[in-house]
Each structure stands twice: as structure tokens, then as C-alpha cells.
Amino acid sequence: MKFELDDEIGQKRAFFKGLKGLFVMKVFLIAGARPNFMKIAPIYREALKHRRVQCSIVHTGQHYDYEMSEAFFEDLELPKPDFFLSAGSGSHAVQTAKIMVAFEELCRNEKPDLIIVVGDVNSTLACSVVAKKLLIEVAHVEAGLRSFDLAMPEEINRMVTDAISGYFFVTEESGAANLIKEGKSKDRIYFVGNVMIDNLFYQVGKLNGKMSEQFATAKIKEKLEYYAFLTLHRPSNVDTKSGFSEIIEALNLIAAKMPILFPVHPRTKKMMDEFNLRLSNNITLFSPLSFKESLFIWKDAKVVLTDSGGLQEETTALGIPCVTIRENTERPITIKMGSNILAGTKKTSILKAFEEVLIKPREQFRVPPKWDGKAAERIWKILLKK
Ligand code: UD1
């Protein structure tokens, strides 16, 4: 993917240069992988309301396929990134190192006052460490979440980022409790709600009938009376043949009862091909979908089956039953609210959770406090000390 600076960004830069003399907070908003893009969109939109903020988007290039990156920028109404670091794929060390080297050079040239990192991907960790060592303040959005599973690369990313951040913006009470247990000062912990949900509400509002008709999946959805929506990409689920086969056995049994719609992540596709795994004909595969098209499908699903962090939260916000195909979750509030069941990764446990979630009365599902679409607004108020 090639992001080139366009006129719009050139004009924005010229405008900020013209503000010389006024106090302007120069902020880098960091994104690298698909789940970051939904989180930076509301923060960026809100930044534009503040004249004292010069907010630039830095895309590390961790995800680079059109469907995994550029399509999301278009869909989420984000401008092209101001800076693109072209890190690409690689082992964790290679990917993290490439981002660090490129980001260090960028920070030395551009001297931001603050960087905002979101979530728990390698880009989050890499940019936080670089900034902090250059004495640039770091704000972590979605701080304090813990799965307590150090076999998960994201858990390491979360812990390292939180070890050095200056601002902790938390989405749920467990985030604040974990940070306090780790000795962080209460003064730096801000329970602001969830930017992922800000984005969700904004996008649900935009999904009007006409737009939905254009989706390639609309015809498939129309024909189905009910269906399940599936996403799967965690290395712990797809990177070993025995583990992945066991999950697929469960999914094939679920597919005998209910059609499954499955947009396939590049990692998952690679492993499915490598292990030569057979899926039921009742599971329809797609390439990765845009945010809106994916939402268009899962918001009306009978159940969502997933190992994603974001979907656990988004289904909770819209009250859709969710089966989480993982051994643990760093988002316990989604279970407490009633809509999400932690299924484990064994065939029998996944099937049991599937049966269980379907009979749960939906009217008992609740939405966590402050998941109201205003998290980004709260974040900027705090950063600007308003
Ligand atoms: C990363 C994040 C994970 C997040 C996920 C969402 C880390 C440690 N992991 O995992 O937290 O949930 O993104 O997607 O940061 N690939 C492509 N095209 C792309 C990107 C990746 O084909 O645009 C392929 C490559 O073969 C790559 C593999 O997918 O090796 C995995 O990509 P990578 O970014 O390493 O990790 P994810 O599994 O996507």
C-alpha cells in the first residue's frame, strides 16, 4: 500500500505553520494494525474540534494489504496518514524493530509534544518505547486491560506500554483496578469509556438502507433467515494444526445447525491452506471485509463467534450474543454484562457455549458505564486540561 501526501494534508500543514506564536499541542496519533484504525477515527475527528491541537496520523505499516488498511481509512472517513512508516510483516522482533527505527527518526525530525497509542499491537509498544526514551509524553488509550496470559504477544505489549505511559485512558473498571494493583498513581488513570464504541455508534448511524444494498454480501444476508458470524485470527487458535482442527470441528458442527459467515484474516487463510483444513459447505468464506460491511452482517447475526478483542466489546454494546473462542479475556466486563461467554478452545466447550448463549434472554444484557460514544471527547478534555 502506498500512502502519498495529498493536497489536503499539505494545506493542513501550511495552516499550522501559519499559527506560529500561538500555543499548539503537536500530537502524533499512532495506528498500525486493523483494530487500531477504528480506535483512532473518533480521536482524530474530535481533535479537529480543538484549535490548539495539531494532530497527525502516523501509520506504521504493520498492516498493509488494501483490505486490512487503506479500505479502513476510506470506510472510517480518516484522511490519508500524515506519515507512513512502511514497517510491514516479519517476526515480532523484526516488525517491532523496523517500526522503532523509523519512528525514532520521525520523532527526531518532527518533535511531537505527545503521542497517543491505542490498544495492544506491536505498533503500540514500539512507538511508546521510542517516544518515552526521547522524553515525549505517551497517552495509552485502552490501558490496564490484562488477560494475565504472557503467551499472548498483546499481553506483553499492554504491560510494557502501561509501564511507561503518562496517561492511562481506561475502558472498563478492571483496567483501572489492574493499573492500581501494578502501583500506578490514581491521578494518571482516567475512566473515559471506549473509543471503539464511539466509532461503532458513529458507524451504525451511517449504515443506511441504500448504502447496505451496495455490499456484495447483501444478497447472501438477504437469503438467510438466521446465521452466525465468525472471526478467527489469534496465533494461539490458528498457528497449530491440532488446535485449529479442533476449533474447526466445533465450527463444522455449529454449521450443521446454522449457516456461518466468515471473513478470513490473512494469517488464518495462510494457516488453513498450510494445514489443508476442510470447512463445512455451510460456512461461507469472504476476504477481509470493510468495517461497515462487517458491521452490516454481524449486527443482525443470531450469534457472533470470535477470538477478537474488539468484537467482544462491540457485541456487548449492541446486545448481540457472543461466543469468545479463547481461554481468557482481558475484557471481563463483556462477560459481566451478560452477552459474552468465554468458550475456551476445545470442541465440547465451544459447542456448550454456543448452546448456552442462544438461550440467554437478550433483555438481560447490559451495556457498561460510559460506553456512550463520548470517550474521545473526554480524552481531549483531559489532555487539554479543560
Ligand atoms: C495483529 C496484532 C493483533 C491484532 C491483529 C488484527 C500484534 C502482536 N498482533 O495480528 O493483536 O488482533 O493484528 O488483525 O500486533 N498479513 C497480510 N497482510 C496484512 C497484514 C498481515 O497478509 O496487511 C499476513 C502476513 O502474512 C503476516 C500475518 O498476516 O505475517 C500476520 O500479521 P501480523 O501483523 O504479524 O499479525 P496479526 O496476526 O495480523
Image: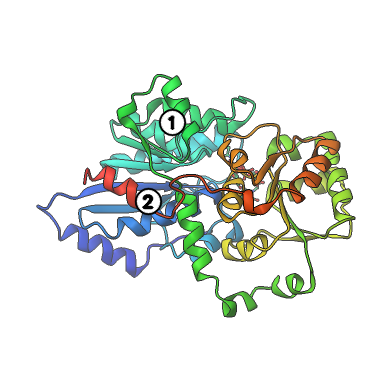
Whether ligand 1 has any atom under 8 Å from the Cβ at mark 2 is answered as no
Q: Which mark is residue 317?
A: none
Q: Residue furthest bottom?
A: 210
Q: Locate residue 161 relative to residue 342 in the image: left or right.
A: left
Amino acid, disc 1: Ala
| Element class at badge 2 | helix
Q: In the rendered view of the protein, which quadrant contains the N terminus?
A: bottom right
- Check whether the beta carbons of the residues at disc 1 and disc 2 lie within 8 A of each other: no
Query: Where does label 1 land, which residue?
Result: 176
| Circle 2 residue | 376
Badge 2 density bin: few <14, some 14–19, many ≥20, Cα 10 Å: many
Query: In the rendering, at what x and y percent does residue 105 appear?
Result: 35, 40
Three-letter code for the amino acid on which mark 2 is drawn: Ala
In this picture, is 226 found above or below 271? below
- Secondary structure type for disc 1: helix
Q: Tell me the residue at 56%/38% (across/down).
A: 333
> Do we see residue 215 in this rendering?
yes
Q: Nearer the viewer, residue 181 or 162?
A: 181
Quarter for ligand 1?
top right
Q: Position of residue 210 (x, y in %)?
A: 58, 80
Which residue is located at x 79 percent, y 73 percent? 223
Is residue 88 depicted above or below 180 in this figure? below
> As displayed, is residue 140 above or below residue 148?
below
Residue 262, picture quadrant:
bottom right
Residue 118 rendering spot, x and y as whole percentages: 45, 43
Judge by depth and name the residue closer to the eye, 371 or 72: 371
Question: Residue, x 64% and y 61% (percent of image)?
Answer: 299
Q: Nearer the viewer, mark 1 or mark 2?
A: 1
Point 21% across, 63% down: residue? 15
